[in-house]
Amino acid sequence: MNRTFIMRECLGKALWLCFCLSITGCAEDDRMTPLSADSGDTADELIPIQISLTGDNDYHSSSFNDTSTRSHSPLIAEWVGVKAFSPTRTGEQPDYEGPRIASMELTEDTLPRVSTRATVPVGVYFRLIIFRKSGSDYVFQSAADYASNGTGTPVLKQGKLLTRSGTIRVVGYSFNTTAAADLGAMPASYTYNSSTVSIPNMSKDFMTFDSGDITSVNSLSHNLLPVSFSQKLCKLTITISPTGFPNNTISNCTGVYVKQGGNSTSWKIGPSSNVVAANTNNTAAFSPNTTLSTTIRMVPFAGARTITVHFNTLTVGGRIVPNNTEITSTGSVQLKEGKSYTMKIQFKKGPGINVLESDINLTQNGCTVQDKKDLAKLIWADGNLKSTGASNNYVWTTSTDYGYYYTWNQDYNRNNIDPCTRLNPTTYGSEWRTPSINELTKLSRCTNKIVTNKGVWFMNNSKGIFLTVAGARGAGGCGTVGTHFVGEVGFYWSSDNNNSNNNWARRLVLDARSTLSIEIQADGPKGDGHSVRCVKGTKQ
């Protein structure tokens, strides 16, 4: 009897110890042990979370709740300096010294729509993760992957959202793609505000969800949790266009990227205030080639700074831009999370005509290989000089306009100064001059000697320069209207004196009164009013 009593007493104590340990174990599990589908917990202890996919905030300019009409002023609008376009990489072309040659305009896009759309696009995968609040910590409970089916009830693809009662927080993320693999493998657990999601490059979108703290959770089976994603990156659309070229086309456009654009690296799974970690690497390069618009994604800027767009190679209007050309804003701007921007880059032909050696094809009048090499180093004015007075705001006219008439090496007021130096530097740049007789001689040989529309083409009959037969003013000096041989003969001053007679200067004459003759003459009276076609480049 005693022996039986002792055995019963020992057995009771053992059972009581096991019961206590069991209670302790449950309390510890509730506080710390991650909950998963195969955790061994009974279904009665778990609360399933049902979700309702209510929408996503696609890239926008302002809150979707704000339906007011808005017109955004450009954040950046300026001309940016770019080197001269060159047909070669040997430096044979003259450096561009005129006005800036590319414009950069950055604008925040307008509101794309007035209300949030119902759901994310069909087939997009996303992951939701539940944490239960324990003190100041958040303890992982469960995770699940879904795919949108175009309704508010997405399709469960992997895992299950389960939690114990209390205060919970649901965090989610998506790359806004239909590829399940983009979400990555689902780990056994997550650590709140520590575990990270890798964002490898700018080809992926990225958006997140944060429910905030949801208190007093007992059963959400019949209370759907609304899920709506927000963009964590910003979107930048770069458009490229040319203007002012004989052929407004863009080709060979490769290796375009935003310098130090902030490539993404990772995002900490946690509150919505967490930003995407960024490095200072360049954005992934893209090659629009002939496609003049490309959209990329970037990590938002932490603060205002300048923006640099890099081009590895680029050909505009048949003219090669130097390799590794960069266009940098002088103004600073901050690109913000979830917003969409458009940057317009416009390449504008610099003032004047520069004909590539390979494009000089009017060789019927004895144009030599050396002539073409030398002429390709010069930039010619588009039209004849056409201004009065003595100020430095002269302009040139169109190619077919006659322009005004000037005495040799004098401005319109007959001050002893090269009239080409009077060209407005703001519009045309500096270092314009009257061409030398050697330059006019080379030009005179590179033509087909055909009169067209009261003028003659030189170097190329579409990309070259067109000299009109504007006549002259004889001894009438400077003036706006010709008095002799108008529409029949063209007289163009050179910068060279006649060495034997100080009253004469050298000139190019186009005589179209019968069969066209092109002559270099040494006996032009300096007091006569002639046309002036300006040029720039090293004097030959």
Image (spheres, helix red, strand yellow):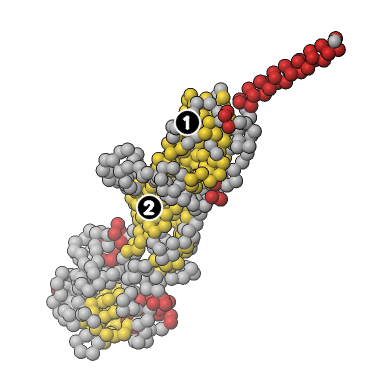
218 up-or-down from 469: above or below? above
Q: Which residue is drawn at 46% across and 44% down?
A: 154
Q: Residue at x 62, y 31 (%)?
A: 41
Q: Residue at x 50, y 34 (%)?
A: 49
* Between discs 1 and 2, the one toward the N terminus: 1
Q: Could you say which is closer to the camera, residue 238 or residue 478?
A: 238
State the mark number for residue 220. Answer: 1
Q: Could you say which is closer to the camera, residue 65 or residue 107?
A: 65
Image check: 67 left or right of 32? left
| Mark 2 lies on residue | 343
Q: Could you say which is closer to the camera, residue 259 or residue 269?
A: 269
Q: Distance between the residues labelled 1 and 2?
A: 46 Å
Count neighbours of disc 1 (C-alpha within 10 A) and say few if under 14, some if 14 to 19, many if 20 or more.
Answer: some
The residue tagged with tag 1: helix, strand or loop? Answer: loop
Residue 189 drawn at (x, y percent): 61, 37
* Quadrant of image for the C terminus: bottom left
**What's the residue type where badge 1 is placed?**
Leu
Image check: 436 left or right of 175? left
Q: Residue at x 43, y 71 (%)?
A: 87
Please tell me in which quadrant of the rendered image residue 350 appears.
Answer: bottom left
Residue 436 drawn at (x, y percent): 34, 74
Query: Looking at this rendering, what residue extends furthest in the front direction?
Result: 1
Query: Looking at this rendering, what residue extends furthest in the top direction?
Result: 2
Count neighbours of disc 2 (C-alpha within 10 A) and say few if under 14, some if 14 to 19, many if 20 or more.
Answer: many
* Quadrant of image for the N terminus: top right
Residue 439 drawn at (x, y percent): 35, 76
Please tell me in which quadrant of the rendered image residue 510 appears.
Answer: bottom left
410 up-or-down from 221: above or below? below
Image check: 51 left or right of 344? right
Residue 292 drawn at (x, y percent): 39, 61
